[in-house]
Image (tube, helix red, strand yellow):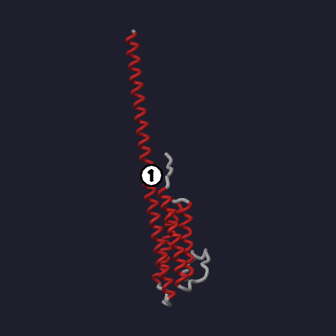
Amino acid sequence: MVEAIFGLVGVLLGGTLTWLQTVYSTRQQRVAELDKRRHDERVRWIEHKRDVFVGLQTTARAWSRCLTEACLESLNGRAGDISLVDSARELEDRFRAHRYDLDILSGRKVSEAAFEVGKRLEMLSEAIGLTTDRNTLYPSGPRISSRDDLETRVREIKRLRVAMVVAMREEINAPMLIAP
């Protein structure tokens, strides 16, 4: 009888230990899967954000160059090149499209930096006479009358673009919280 009780206790104890081992191993597996999911999600978001950031940055640079070229032509007394005007408007539209994505995907600091860059580019556009219905929201100040004035404005835009890149890098490298 005692042997039967010891046998029963042994079977129960063995079964319990096997069950606990299975529960523990399943839990470890779930934790590992959750960690992998978090990592994959972070990588996916970073890649998506990086694509939007690169698109916005390259468009801002191209728009700035296009406006600078148009302004230099104007300062040199040459008639405005229609293709430059069309390019500037196309780049402005592309910049705005990237800004919409950016506002959805990124944090406040990056959005504010991108807003400032866009605002200054619109002001430069208006200051050289390339007005659209969109860029009349911000007074551009006086028209650009010299290369020095143009260089000052372009330097300010470049400074703002660099600040935007810094904010983007900070956001890409910041830890991300993803719900389980």
Mark 1 lies on a secondary structure that is helix
Q: Residue at x 52, y 60 (%)?
A: 106
| Image quadrant where residue 34 sits | top left
- In the rendered view, does 92 fall on the left or right side of 19? right
Count of picture labels = 1
Question: Above or below — where is 62 with respect to 44?
Answer: below
Q: Residue at x 51, y 87 (%)?
A: 75
Label 1 neighbour load within 10 Å: few <14, some 14-19, many 20+? some
Give how far across and how far down residue 5 sits, in percent: 41, 13
Question: Above or below — where is 117 with respect to 104?
Answer: below
Give how far across and how far down residue 172 sits, in percent: 47, 58
Location of mark 1 (residue): 41
Q: Nearer the viewer, residue 122 or 164?
A: 164
Residue extending farthest bottom: 77
Give how far across and how far down residue 149 sits, in percent: 55, 82
Residue extending farthest top: 1
- In the rendered view, does 89 fall on the left or right side of 40? right
Give how far across and how far down residue 123 sits, in percent: 57, 76
Question: Above or below — where is 164 with respect to 19?
Answer: below
| Image quadrant where residue 24 sits | top left
Q: Residue at x 50, y 47 (%)?
A: 179
The quadrant of the rendering that contains the N terminus is top left
Amino acid of disc 1: Glu
